[in-house]
Image (cartoon, rainbow, N blue to C red):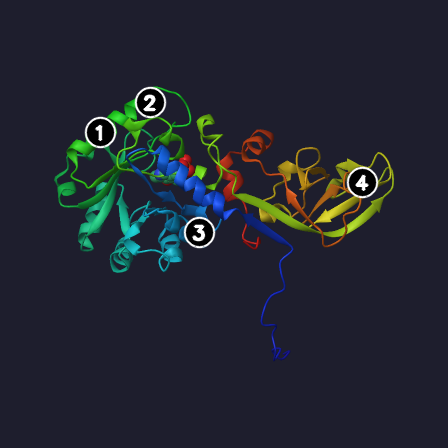
Amino acid sequence: MAPMPADRPRQNPPAALRLGIDREALAANWRTLDRLSGAACAGAAVKADAYGIGARIAVPLLWAAGCRDFFVTYVSEAAEIIDLVPPASISLLHGPLNPADAAWAREAGVRVVINSPEQAARWIEAGGGVCDVMVDSGINRLGLPMSAIGDAMLQQLDVDVLMSHLASADEDVASNAVQCSRWNEARRAVPHRRASLANSAGITLGADYHGDLTRPGLSLYGGIARAELASEIRPVARPMAAIMQVRHIAAGEGVGYNSKFIAPAAMQVGVIALGYADGYLRCWSSGKGAMLHGTRRLPVLGRVSMDMTVVDLTAAPELREGDWVEAEYDLVEGAKASGLSQYELLTLLGRRFAR
Ligand SMILES: *Cc1c(COP(=O)(O)O)cnc(C)c1O
């Protein structure tokens, strides 16, 4: 057996790709959403690693900006940030899925969201304590059915946030007002301290939708949840990667798997350290995606591979190995071009990025 190396390097060399995070923009987006929430305070959905931005980066920034409520999905996500903010400011959206979750949340001092009579019983069984409640006002996904809001068991809960979730806040449809009135009905039936309905898009629907607390996610991280937010919200994430090799290819040569691009003439191309395993998907292949160097656009040639992408360097012939480029990643335009949602474009951004 080979011996273990005695001296391992103390620090890894810098990565060839990084996710540029505009920290000031993230804080500014929270302040904007808090202001647009009127009399309500804005919390923050930081589930899914803060939509790919990195929860351990986002949470302290949001706390410093004034945010006091953080919504995660799983116990593992709560554990990931529990040393950064007071545990009672963390709320577990999926609720206690089993007795172990309930015991963990009680011990950690994290709020659980009660989504069903079964979860309410599980929480009381575990000893109870401050919790949140999600009422399903029409999304038919997760939450207490409206038929259960009068249950005696709910009266035994110590409810901080009574919430519901809008299915179509990004559209002007009648169901928004229907959900709002059901949420108000639940507010009358279930004793609670604070009420919450709106996600990013819901914040723009007006004061009726604000309650005491709003729960933006997407627009904190630069997503334009509704057109009204386009002039208010700043981009946050910038995927960047280094050029690993500059190549000269002759007319008629193919680039990448299955030669989906054939050079029409001799050209200079750059091989970039960014691929679909990083969340830079194959939908950006030939003609769709591009890298940027300053204002110059370097179109993707052929297929995006797992760990690399080839771009046309015609517009920036002086670029060399080790130079950095930025992936064009405007969320609104990217969603149109790729057919993916802005949510997917953000949460895709992988773990290999240095952040
Ligand atoms: C994800 C989530 C949010 C945030 O929604 P955005 O559309 O990203 O603003 C708010 N509330 C709940 C319950 C969620 O699951």
Question: Image quarter for residue 85?
Answer: bottom left
Label 2 vs label 1, nearer the camera: 1
Asked whether the viewer can see residue 127, the reply is yes
Q: Which residue is mark 4?
A: 254
Circle nearer the N terminus (4, 1) = 1
- Which residue type does callout 1 highlight? Asn
Q: Cα distance, mark 2 to mark 1?
A: 14 Å
Q: Are marks 3 and 4 in contact (CB under 8 Å)?
A: no
Of 42 and 283, nearer the camera is 42
Quadrant the N terminus occupies = bottom right
Ligand 1 resides in the quarter of the picture at top left
How crowded is the residue under tag 2: few (<14 C-alpha within 10 Å), some, or many (20+)?
some
Circle nearer the N terminus (1, 3) = 3
Q: Are marks 2 and 3 in contact (CB under 8 Å)?
A: no
Q: Which residue is mark 2?
A: 175
Q: Which residue is mark 1?
A: 184
How crowded is the residue under tag 4: few (<14 C-alpha within 10 Å), some, or many (20+)?
some
Label 2 vs label 3, nearer the camera: 3
Circle nearer the N terminus (2, 3) = 3
How crowded is the residue under tag 1: few (<14 C-alpha within 10 Å), some, or many (20+)?
some
- Checking the image for residue 55, the label placed there is 3
Asked whether the viewer can see residue 307, the reply is no
Q: Are marks 2 and 4 in contact (CB under 8 Å)?
A: no
Label 3 vs label 4, nearer the camera: 3
Q: Residue at x 87, y 39 (%)?
A: 266
- Which residue type does callout 3 highlight? Ala
Circle nearer the N terminus (2, 1) = 2
Q: Cα distance, mark 4 to mark 1?
A: 61 Å
